[in-house]
Image (cartoon, rainbow, N blue to C red):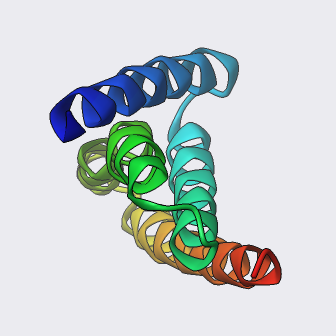
Amino acid sequence: MAALLVGLGGSLGAASRHAVGITIEGRESVVVVNALGSFTLGVVLAAPVGSTALWIVGIGFCGAFTTFSSFAVETVSTAEDGEVGVASAFAVGNLLSALLGLGIGLAVGALAV
């Protein structure tokens, strides 16, 4: 049953990631999905939602919505284009926005207690 719930969340996360990708192009979409996905995961982890929500949203949706591989490709390709400073700023900014999103999500989720 857990695998079906994760698959359901994953399909929704992948479709949502695609929607963001066609709405916001380029590196910015990677930062947006990673920050929003981290926020969502923080809320689910801190709120008393139960294991079903953790499987659907935490593992399935957030796992498919966030994108480490696109983050890596964008960082490396930007550096290979000779924009090492931009690549470095992108990498640091992506990490900081994801951590900030997680922290805010944990705070928001804790309010539900």
Residue 21: x percent and y percent? 54, 24
Q: Quadrant of residue 110?
A: bottom right
Number of marks drawn: 0
Q: Quadrant of residue 25?
A: top right
Q: Residue at the location (23% across, 45% down)?
A: 69
Judging depth in this view, the residue of 6 and 21 nearest the camera is: 6
Q: Residue at the location (22% across, 40% down)?
A: 2
Residue 79: x percent and y percent? 30, 57
Judging depth in this view, the residue of 109 and 62 nearest the camera is: 109
Judging depth in this view, the residue of 10 and 69 nearest the camera is: 10
Residue 63: x percent and y percent? 33, 46
Q: Residue at the location (49% across, 64% down)?
A: 90
Q: Is residue 27 above or below residue 38?
A: above
Image check: 18 left or right of 106?
left
Q: Residue at the location (48% across, 61% down)?
A: 50
Residue 92: x percent and y percent? 47, 77
Locate the C terminus and report the quarter of the image it occupies. bottom right
Q: Is residue 11 above or below residue 97?
A: above
Q: Is residue 38 above or below residue 89?
A: above
Q: Is residue 24 above or below residue 102?
A: above
